[in-house]
Image (cartoon, helix red, strand yellow):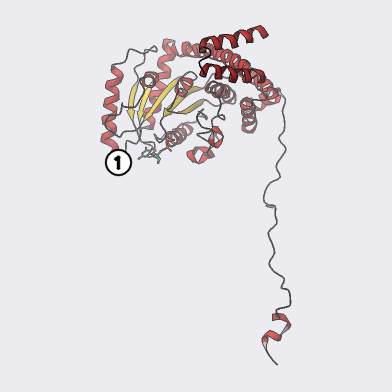
Amino acid sequence: MEHIENNDEFGGLSVNKGIEQPPTVNPYLKKRQKKKHYTPDEYVEGILRGDRTILSQAVTLVESSRTEHQAVAQEVIEKCLPHAGNAIRVGITGVPGAGKSTSIDTFGMHLISKGKKLAVLAIDPSSERSKGSILGDKTRMEQLSVQENAFIRPSPSAGSLGGVARKTRETIILCEAAGFDTIIVETVGVGQSETAVHSMVDFFMLLQVPGTGDELQGIKRGIMELADGVVINKADGNNIEKAQLAQAQFRNALHLFPATQSGWSPKVLTYSGYYGLGITEIWDMVYEYMDFTKINGYFDFRRSEQAKYWMYESINENLKNHFYKNHHRETELKHMEQQVLKGEISSFIAAKRMLDEYFREK
Ligand code: GDP
């Protein structure tokens, strides 16, 4: 019988050709190049040439906890040191949502338009997630992240604050040797990280948002005292009046503080990171501060104090690591801890015994 289904072409028993399956491996994926290991001199030479890939790899070494990486990193840092120190270093702190990334993005574009080369680093010891980075997501700084004259590096992975901060400080040296003339170090407004950032920058900026009408609430006095400038963000739209009110409150509060060691009176400005309003004034303030402190000698004084501080920090960090990073001692400590908890021994005696034993091992 004449029927279309009796036709071979449409018969159910024949196997159709089917469609071509995509390959299991993405053909567009570039073959991953094996990471080249450079000698310390090659790293230094690359950094001084401004090679960003080599700079990035050197920073990775600085951040690594492996002894062999650290040895190379320290040699590279030492050789870069004579070429560092010429940038201005600005710390920026503010609670999450204050507008740090929006502001740094806008600040960065402003600086680049003035011919500057900017490195943005971060200290966030609190965050284990996303490999300890508040800058992990580069989309946070959309415009800046694609600029040739900007180098954005997330916070080193979580660890002790001292360790994370040391790595960032060493990264500053590498970035400066690579020719970046402006360094911004960002931190979230929690815990002790402000103190750490303050100890590695020339100018410390506190970012605030207008809101409740009582802006000073919730800000630790200690952080206010660290600030060389307070900038009130989101001064746009309906927020303008609130921002001005906040500005007045901060100015009054800062008046009550004792004079700063630098002789500089911290300024309070309003701006909008989002709309790029008031940005020039903020950087004028930063440059004015630099001139002021360079003339009165405070700039050099602060940098030498910081160098001293980091020497002691480094000693403390190493001692602590040496004490704690010992398998046998970890067990002993747990044992002691239990005795202290049970009230069998006082905290001080327990500590003394552990330390005595440690020094006897020496
Ligand atoms: P961060 O957590 O401190 O980095 O804050 P973000 O930069 O991510 O900003 C938090 C929110 O505030 C985002 O939704 C921004 O769009 C908004 N924001 C940031 N700057 C401004 C500003 O100048 N004006 C206004 N109206 N909103 C802003």
Q: From the viewer's perspective, tell me whether residue 152 is left or right of residue 91.
A: right
Q: Is residue 342 above or below residue 38?
A: above
Q: Is residue 232 above or below residue 337?
A: below
Q: From the viewer's perspective, tell me whether residue 254 is left or right of residue 98.
A: left
Location of mark 1 (residue): 237
Residue at the extreme bottom of the image, as rendered: 1
Q: Is residue 254 above or below residue 24?
A: above
Q: Which quadrant is the C terminus positioned in?
A: top right
Q: Secondary structure at mark 1?
A: helix
Please tell me which residue is depicted at 56% across the width and 9% down the height of the picture.
352
Identify which residue, 107 or 308, lies in the foreground.
308
Residue 106 visible to the viewer: yes
Q: Where residue 338 appears, x then y in whole percent?
A: 55, 20
Q: From the viewer's perspective, tell me whether residue 328 is left or right of residue 282.
A: right
Identify which residue, 61 or 231, lies in the foreground.
61
Q: Where residue 94 appears, x then y in whole percent?
A: 41, 29
Q: Quadrant of residue 180?
A: top right
Ligand 1 shows up in the quarter that is: top left
